[in-house]
Amino acid sequence: MTLSLTEELVLLTLDPQSGRPALDSVRMKAAVAGAAVAQLTLDGALALDGPDGRRARLRRTGTAEPSDPLLREVFAVADGRRPQDAVSKLGGADAWRDRAGALRTHLLERMAAAGVLSREDDRVLGLFPRTRWRTVDPATTDRLRVRVTGALNGGDGPTDARTAALVALLAATDRLSAVTGLPRAEARRRAEVATAGDWAAPAVRAAVQEVHAVLAATRVGTTAATTAATS
């Protein structure tokens, strides 16, 4: 199975031991939303309609369109919006509809149908439903890990925009250390080097940057709430 950028991200954010997400829901939704917008840009379906900047908006290119129903919905939501607004609408903390969560589940089910994963359903304490996703084909995940690690070890950084986007998204969600085995600080440092420069179209970079912004805002809000509660 040839994985999309979003599927690669979803696969690498699974905890291999528990079969559950390795990220909290806020980071997971933001990352999936950013990956989906970046993927549509890499596929040529979306592009920024003006100079790189906060006012530029994503527009349909007319040369490509996703065939997947849920990606078509992402496509429709992103069209005409600034990258930051598209990511927030799809997977931000204030998004009233969990499109990013629905897309993630859809992609997990598709990978299970292709034999990459297996689905296990059970109940916690016999009451609360729980789904685990187990790796059936470890070689797929191993190849992804090697590719990401190689991008961080290479002197010239990632060899393609898709790998750079994956590295940047994993770094934004603080998942890069677990994927590569590098110490956290070292993984962040290498990611900054690997994703420096013109590695992708402005719309891809903007989508990834917005994941950073959404998560940074969430951390600030959590810190403020904790400070208020303890003061």
Image (tube, rainbow, N blue to C red):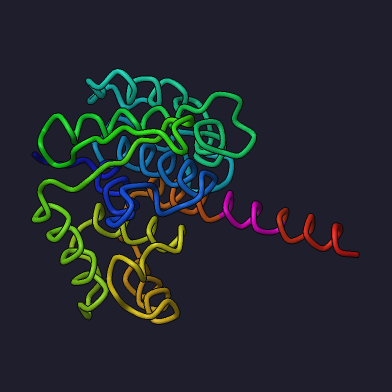
In the displayed structure, does residue 73 sit left or right of residue 69?
A: right
Give residue 181's position: percent from left, percent from top. Answer: 29, 75
**The one of 195 and 18 positioned closer to us in this rendering:** 18
**The one of 48 and 138 positioned closer to us in this rendering:** 138
In the displayed structure, does residue 75 sit left or right of residue 90?
A: left
Indicate the quadrant where residue 216 lies.
bottom right
Indicate the quadrant where residue 230 lies.
bottom right
**Span colored in magenta:** 213-220
Which secondary structure is most common in the magenta stretch?
A: helix
Q: Residue furthest front?
A: 126
Which residue is drawn at the image coordinates 86% and 58% (left, top)? 228
The image quadrant where one finds the N terminus is top left
Give residue 148's position: percent from left, percent from top. Answer: 23, 65
**The one of 230 and 175 positioned closer to us in this rendering:** 230
The image quadrant where one finds the C terminus is bottom right
Q: How many marks?
A: 0
Give residue 7's position: percent from left, percent from top. Answer: 26, 41
Indicate the quadrant where residue 118 lies.
top left
Give residue 53's position: percent from left, percent from top. Answer: 54, 48
